[in-house]
Amino acid sequence: MFSKILIANRGEISCRIIRTAKQLGIRTVAVYSDADSHALHATLADEAIHIGASPAADSYLQYERIIEAAKKTGAQAIHPGYGFLSENASFRRRCDEADIVFIGPPVGAIEAMGSKSAAKTIMEKAGVPLVPGYHGDDQDEAILKAAADKMGYPVLLKAAAGGGGKGMRQVWAESEFSAALAAAKRESMKSFSDDKMLVEKYLTGPRHVEIQVFCDGHGNAVHLFERDCSIQRRHQKVIEEAPAPGMTEDLRKAMGDAAIRAAQAIDYVGAGTVEFLLDTDGSFYFMEMNTRLQVEHPVTEMISGQDLVEWQLRVASGETLPCEQSDLSIRGHAFEARIYAEDPANDFLPQTGTLNFLKEPGQDDHVRIDTGVIEGDTISVYYDPMISKLICWDENRDRALKRLQNALAAYSVGGLATNIDFLYNISHCAAFERAELDTGFIEKHSDELFRNSPGQRAEDLQSVIPMAALYVLLDQAQTSNTRRQHSKEADSPWNSAFGWRANSPAHCVLKLRWQDQEVTVAAEPLADAKTQGFRLTIDDLSMEASATLEERSLTAVINGHRLSASVGKHGDEYSLYLPDRAFSFSRLKADTGEFDSAQSADHFAAPMNGTIVAQIATAGSDVKKGDVLLIMEAMKMEHSITAPSDGKVVNFFFDAGELVDGGAQLLEFEASE
Ligand code: ADP
């Protein structure tokens, strides 16, 4: 076994590898960029070497510097993690030349799977089933189109060099083929500097089921069962689980055998994943093989009781696999939810900023959190905006799902938008509970999943909105209590939580806003102040309500109906975690309907580094609430800045075509009276 390894990665996966290395008594070397000089992975390792500027191309992809760092520190092996250099055959070759062990498969295996079309040719020979399609070298448009016409629409165009869902286009009719091909080629060229395409039959309701395989350098190979990764947005995984619901022993064996055949066909060594599409009739088709440790490997670890990083280290140091196929079995069920800094309501736009507040659910045998950040860290424009992976395990799927639901409700991130509420909604979606999974799940259930609104239902006005109002009232009361305790003038009206008026009972009007809706709630404290009771009025509804707020839990009694919810506050955003969904809202200043100043500043800040596309409004002209004022492009997506209320733009700070930094104020806005 090695005595020292270098981890050529960052973030959660780097921390994850360090953890196992420590357990095995292996010393660790981290590498870090400018942006990561205080990052968790760099501080957890025994040593850390600075390898360059923040952009990955100047640091984590600079493989000569990484090799140099390994030599300087005497690391015998390099673990590449996932992404970055993990599937880079030239880097692997450089490691060999430098006499440093690359913890991953041999060059030949990486190269064989580097192109989706070449991989298919190999798999076809090895008798692994393929999605019907064309993966030839002749890229003439007429040939590609003839293949599509022959197999019938819909078809899927895929970049041979593809990954991360890029360079992919569905084509639903012959007439759309040409335009879709041009678009897919353009995207592929941009992302991979290569526009070779393959054409596949587009399956309309498949599941993504993948098999974890492991091979050593002595001819042994096993699989560690399957993972279902059907919950995807834009062809990227969001929630994964193991085992795959509804899997029979026969199908598991057939898929496991096919995966091992795939690995053996390319003389594989180490951890790998063979991805399949599982059709509704039980047929399965090879999609691709990922020649690295996957992001979602923890669910396999939870159900198999094995540490896959330990296996990688053992195999790379020349040992045989720790066990045989017959020694492996499945215990219980595990989910992994990927917590991202992104805005689901805005087409999952990545968010950058500071993690002002971070409270994770407690970890135990059932809940595991793999993360690379702590409170106060920055999610920068340079890297993937993943905050952590939340992994939950229990004896069966239902119980594991409950764990996931509870853990999501207890996860609080402040400072930037996250997908936590969206994940919470998935975990509570009835179809998900029934394990009705397919890769179109999110699209199919979008009404339910993107729902962050109590809607128009009467029961919402009678329960959800009053609870939201009570949460704000109690939160304010607590803030003002704290203020009062620190103040000399304890009875000063300026320390009161509620709108204070001389000689009249204190009352206040709250304006709550979510997405593009708002509601006004009038609250008047009831005579017996000890009970924190209020008369709430919403439209023409009036109710008596009281509540207690303890830590993250709100209990309310509304017209004699007791309800409870977990709650969270992230900056100006409040969240209620109700039994069936999350509801996030913010409070507007009651008198003007404007946002609080902090929020209005945020509203006009560039969400990330990008380019101004166009000024839509004219400075000085009146605009209506919701009108688009300006469009910017960031991370290849357009993002609209809208008016939070009626008013006018006083001044734009940037012209079309100008580059802006994330966080920069884009314009000055004046709300009308
Ligand atoms: P990438 O390497 O870009 O991630 P994959 O080939 O792994 O691309 O496919 C990603 C996802 O796209 C799959 O998980 C699946 O949801 C969808 N997909 C891929 N091929 C097909 C197909 N032939 N029919 C239907 N969906 C597909």
Image (cartoon, rainbow, N blue to C red):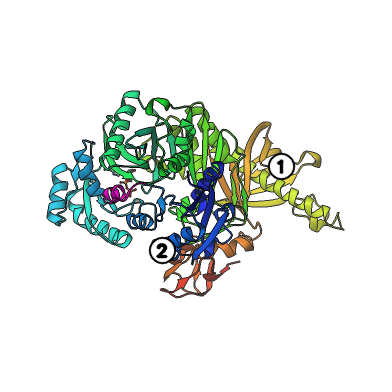
In the drawing, does residue 57 fall left or right of residue 468? left
Q: Which quarter is ligand 1 in? A: top left
- Res 120 → quadrant: top left
Number of disc labels: 2
The residue segment tinted magenta is: 105-115
In the drawing, does residue 440 fall left or right of residue 494? left
- Which of labels 2 and 1 is toward the front? 2
Residue 535 numbered tag: 1
In reply to whether residue 108 is colored magenta, the answer given is: yes
Which is nearer the eye, 379 or 673? 379
**Residue at horizontal 44%, vertical 74%?**
658
Which is nearer the eye, 423 or 249? 249
The residue type indicated by label 1 comes to: Arg
Badge 2 density bin: few <14, some 14–19, many ≥20, Cα 10 Å: some
Q: Quadrant of the C terminus?
A: bottom right
Which is nearer the eye, 70 or 145? 70
* Residue that badge 2 annotates: 64
Whole-percent x, y for residue 420 in the image: 53, 45
The residue type indicated by label 2 comes to: Glu
First-in-chain label (2 vs 1): 2
Q: Which structural element holds mark 2?
A: helix
Residue 663 numbered tag: none
Q: Is residue 618 visible?
A: yes
Which is nearer the eye, 180 or 646? 180
Whole-percent x, y for residue 556 in the image: 68, 37
In reply to whether residue 280 is colored magenta, the answer given is: no
